Amino acid sequence: MKKIMKHAGAVGLLALLLIMVVLVATGTGAMHIPPLQVLAILLQKAGITLPVSYDSSTAAVLLVIRLPRVVLAVLIGAGLSMAGAALQGLFRNPMADPGLIGISSGASVGAVLIIVFQASLPLWLNTGWVHYYAMNIAAFCGAFIAAWLIIRIAHTSNGAIVSMMLLGGIALNALCMSFTWLMAYVSTNEQMRSIIFWTMGSLGGATWQTVLAVTPFIVLPLLLLPRLAGALDVFALGENEAKHTGVNVSALKMKLLLLSTMVVAASVAVAGVIGFVGLVIPHIVRQFTGPSYRLLFPCAALSGAILLTVADLFSRTIAAPAELPVGIITAMLGAPFFIWLILKEKRSLLL
C-alpha cells in the first residue's frame, strides 16, 4: 500500500507540474496572458466561471493560436517519451531511441513522399481530414519498415546487439536522409520548404485540425502501452525467462513495435523529426522510478510532455519575433546527454 501511494504521489506531482507548465506556456508570447486569465478562459469553455476579467481578443489568441500548439506539444512529448521507453524495453537497452535507430527518419520518408506527390493523388486523398490521415498512414509505413529492418539487423538469439542496432540506425538514417534530399531535389520551392520543416521539427503548424487528426494515433498507444508493463518487466529478464512465465514474446514484441511506430509516425506527420525526447526522458526517469515499467510509463509520458512544452516555449520566445524549430532545441539538449551515455557505457565496459 505504501508503494502504491508513493507511485501515485510521483505521478500526481508530475501531473501538477505539467498543468503549471501548460498555464505558463499558453500565456507566454507576444501578447502576455496571466495564468489566472488562462485558467479563467479554459474553465469558461468547461462551463465554470471565475471572477477574472478578459476580453474576446485575448480568449481568441489563447484558444485559436496558443492552445492547439501547447496541446500538440503535450501529446507528442508524452507519446515520444513512452514510445522511447517501450523501444528501450523491446531492445533491452537504454540507448534505443526512435531517432537514433532510424524509425523517425523512416516516418519522415513516408511524409515527404506525400508532400512531393500529393498533387498526383486523387482529390479525395488530398483534402481535409483525409489528407492528414494519408500523411499518418504513409509515415506509419515508413516507420514500421525502418523498425523492422533495425530488429532484423540487431537481433540475435541472445537479444539485440546494441552496437549493431546503433550502426544499423546510422546506416538507415543516412539512407533515409539521402532519399529525403533526393525528393527535395525534384520538388518545387514550396515543397522544399515543407521538406525542410520535416527535417528540423517544428510545432509552428499546429491547429485544432492537426491536433484532432493525430490524437487517436497517440492517445491509443498511451492507453495501451501501460497494459503491457507487467509483461515488459518480465521480458527485461530475458526472452526465455519471459516464455517460461507464460508471456507470448512474439506477440509482445509486435505490440510494442506497432504501438511505438504509431506514435512516431503521427508525431512526424504533423511536426517533423523531433529527436532525443524518447532517449533522454525514459533514461532520466528510470533513475528515480527504478526499472519497473508500471511506474516508468506514466512518469515518462508526463515528463516528456513537460520537456517538449518547455522546449517549444523556448523555441518561440528565445529569438522572438523569429522562431527556432523545436527539433534544434531538443537536439541541443539530447546530443550531449547521448555522448554522456556512451561514455558511461564505455566506463562500465572497462571496469
Image (cartoon, rainbow, N blue to C red):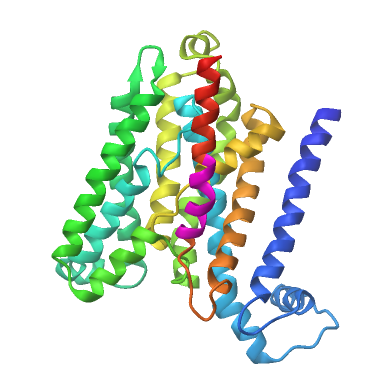
Residue 81, position as x, y percentages in the image: 54, 45
- Nearer to me, 130 or 6: 6
Task: Say above or below: 63 vs 84.
Answer: below
Q: Residue at x 26, y 44 (%)?
A: 174
Q: Residue at x 30, y 59 (%)?
A: 134
User: Position of 150 compared to 25: left or right?
Assistant: left
Q: Quadrant of the N terminus?
A: top right
Task: Say above or below: 300 vs 165.
Answer: below
Q: Residue at x 80, y 88 (%)?
A: 53
- Numbered range of the magenta stretch: 327-337
Residue 43, position as x, y percentages in the image: 74, 73
User: Position of 210 compared to 149: left or right?
Assistant: right
Count of numbered circles on the image: 0
Residue 221 appears in the picture as rendered: no
Task: Say above or below: 338 vs 197.
Answer: above
Residue 36, position as x, y percentages in the image: 79, 76
Residue 48, by quadrant, is bottom right
Q: Quadrant of the C terminus?
A: top right
Q: Residue at x 41, y 46 (%)?
A: 262
Residue 297 appears in the picture as rendered: yes
Residue 339, position as x, y percentages in the image: 49, 38
Task: Say above or below: 277 vs 157.
Answer: below
Q: Is residue 23 magenta?
A: no
- Main SS of the magenta part reads helix
Residue 49, by quadrant, is bottom right
